[in-house]
Image (tube, coloured by chain):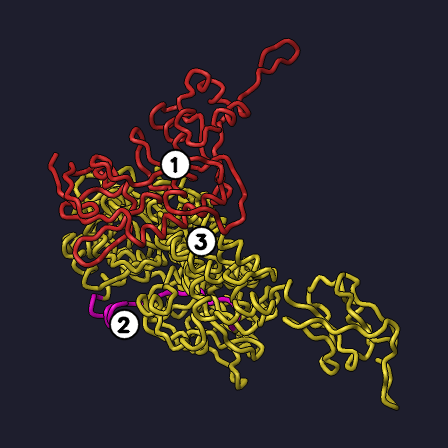
Amino acid sequence: MSEVTLTINNQKVKAEAGTTILEAARRVEIDIPTLCYHEKLAPRGACRLCTVEISKGQRSRLVTACVYPVEDGLKVETESKRVIKIRKMLLELMLASCPGVKSIQDYATRYGITKTRFDVEPSFCILCGLCVHYCSEVKGKNAIGFVGRGIERRVVFFPDIAAEECPKCGECFSLCPTGVLPSNYALARLPQFTYNNIRL
Amino acid sequence: MPRLNSATDLEKLRQEILAHRDPNKPCVTICSGTGCHAYGSEKVADTFLNEIQSKNLQKKVDIRRTGCHGYCERGTIVVIFPEEICYLRVKPEDVPEIIATTLVEGKIIERLLYEDDDGQKIIHEGDIPFYKHQRRIVFGPNRFIDPKSINDYIARGGYAALAKVLSEMTPEQVLEEVKKANLRGRGGGGFPAGIKWETTRNAPGEIKYVIVNADEGDPGAYMDRSLLEGNPHSVLEGLIIGAYTIGAHQGFIYVRQEYPLAVENLYIILEQAREHGLLGANILGSGFDFDVMVHRGAGAFVSGESSALMTAIEGRVGEPRPKYIRTAVSGIWGKPSNLNNVETWATIPLIINNGVTWFTSIGTEKSKGTKIFSLVGKVNNTGLVEVPMGMTLREVIYDIGGGIPHGKKFKGVQTGGPSGGVIPESLIDTRVDFDELTKAGSMMGSGGMIVMDEDTCMVDVARYFLSFLSEESCGQCVPCREGIYQMLKILNRICAGQGKPGDIELLEEIAEVVRDASLCALGATAPNPVLSTIKYFRDEYEAHVEKKRCPAGVCKALISYYIEPKKCQACLICLRNCPAEAISGGKNLIHIINQDKCTKCGVCLEVCPPQFDAVVKLSGVPVPKPVAIGTEVKRKRGEKSE
């Protein structure tokens, strides 16, 4: 693999071609915030928190660091004015939908957000999808998945698969940034039914 | 049907078809597009068939069910060739008269003709103002062709472009033509098709795909539908030419399941093309192999986004993915995949047949050719129109569309579907092309054009489009999922009369982030309806927020109906018609609306006789205190109660 050199926050960084801006930044300990990224999983650019500003020549663009491949001569700003504006709004939006989640609170503090201007409609799940993608990509089981669209999007266990697979595994529990996943699972688990003494 | 093994075979077949057709034999064409279908065109066509049979005229008259003619406002449309006599709003009851008078006696039925503003009757379809100002190169053949008949298509020179490409041109030459024609994608983005083709062609890899995007989902838009329903072979011909150029051997047509007739036609025409040797192995004896699969969409708006569409074809949930590596390089199953819209594909054979010079002579400097729009909303002639790029919105709305009904004032036009924006009256002379519409804060989109009159509330319009987008967001990324939802909540609040100071600024703040940070184009363009209406109609937002007034009188929470006691003649009409029983009064007693019971349906205003004009709609002002119940109407001497 060939090597490229890019500049992240005025710091020259070498990276292997085909890797991403986020990987390059993390290697030199430049911290770009993420919620939906995990090194074992394919990046998806869903939380958009890792948005950074890149430029090559005059024009600058906003891209997500977790997916954007490094390029030779690329200039990356991880905390530019535009980037911070975006992160602040995203965190404010997330404080309205999942105010109790520690990673969101921590990032909010880091970017100086103390309260949200939106009505709080609290949910446990931040929809980062780590559990869903871990189960399908690493375990190949698809016991957990997304249902619904837009604001109705939810993570659910599919009882028939989950009843079979999850008791042996439970690895996604530790990935969940909210810590609520095990209880969700407990609620979704198929109880063992008996009917006329026949176990179903 | 024997296979066609060369361009000569195709031409021979065409001559054979034409030899069996007498150009002077009357042919009754009945529009069977979606609009006319809703008017009952099927019954009209069946009645024609039965009547012609019972009168034993089968040998003298041909009947043809064609695709959409576009003038949907006046369906069912019947055009009789060779004279091109155009009858509008034809009902099954009119059929015997048409046969007896026009087909047998050769006379025209005046009452079924188009009548212009001066009462002048117009006989020929092409002379009707709605059609006269159009340039229907892509959409025009619809009216001559039975979409289920490959012979109809071949008779009009169909597949000649494919034959030419396969027998006379190298893929490089075709690519050069498409690039020179500067054909820009009709799906909305306006990206040059030739450059996209070239990227896919040059991308490494043996396996490549070409795809038709027929996931048309904008509310009120049905151009692609009408092409697939009316002239599907033209789309397929374009696709095969594209495949040959790019080096693809497999194509997909992604079509909405909600378009049953389009789906049905596609299966029929693909089979016809295979039987004729126009699809499958060794097309027209050229050695080029290519086949097509139909993929039916499961009803998600976002699946029209290229990467989501490709994910759906792979058999997964149709959600977009980041496209830092373009789908032209890494699309379906990571293979180079070229996606174009229905209209783009249908334009390709025209460019090959008529040449680049002809094509580039139509349109503006940077937007060549024509564009089909679905002209809907508050406009007299609703329907599908095809105009050269560069025509002004005024020409489209007034010359073709016939202006605004009921003498109302034009207020704005929404172009580009839910992701587009509203263009105000001050910009009505904007030329319709990719760049000018974008400059005006809207976009071409796939070609929706919704005309709005003075009775349209712009905050409500923005609210409507955002509620559509909030339901259609896939929910994957935070700005689109949460941002649109919060914008919608603010708009709902403003429309409900609960707007707060700072709401407009907050909308702008969220909009900017949703635009800049969203994963795909759905999110990136979702703020357009909000931003464009704030830009051009900020005063309307301010009236809602600050004065709790809806200037257009649309937002129910901000309006009240009131009966002016001095004008009320106690005619009982509104009282009897009120569905909420909110009006009290009686004979000779002034009618009063009980504001607590009133549902603001507006029936009282509609039914109050114009000579009294007693009911008024109020907004932003308190409702005057009603007169005491039981107050009698004061009449002048000699006047009688109604």
Q: Position of residue B487 (x, y in %)?
A: 49, 55
Residue B316: mark in rendering: 1
Q: Position of residue A114 (x, y in %)?
A: 45, 46
Q: Residues within 10 Å of mark 2 (few under 14, many from 20)?
A: some
Please tell me which residue lies in front, B338 or A81.
A81
Instruction: Find disc 3 in the rendering and name its residue.
Output: B217
Q: Position of residue B568 (x, y in %)?
A: 79, 79
**In the rendered view of the protein, which quadrant contains the C terminus of chain B?**
bottom right
Q: Earlier in the sequence, mark 3 or mark 1?
A: 3
Q: Secondary structure at mark 2?
A: loop
The stretch in magenta equals B355-379
Q: Residue at x 42, y 74 (%)?
A: B396
Subunit under mark 3: B
Q: Earlier in the sequence, mark 2 or mark 1?
A: 1
Q: Residue at x 60, y 60 (%)?
A: B498
Disc 2 and disc 1: Cα gap in Å? 41 Å
Residue B364: mark in rendering: 2
Amino acid bearing label 1? Arg
Mark yes or no: residue B183 visible: yes
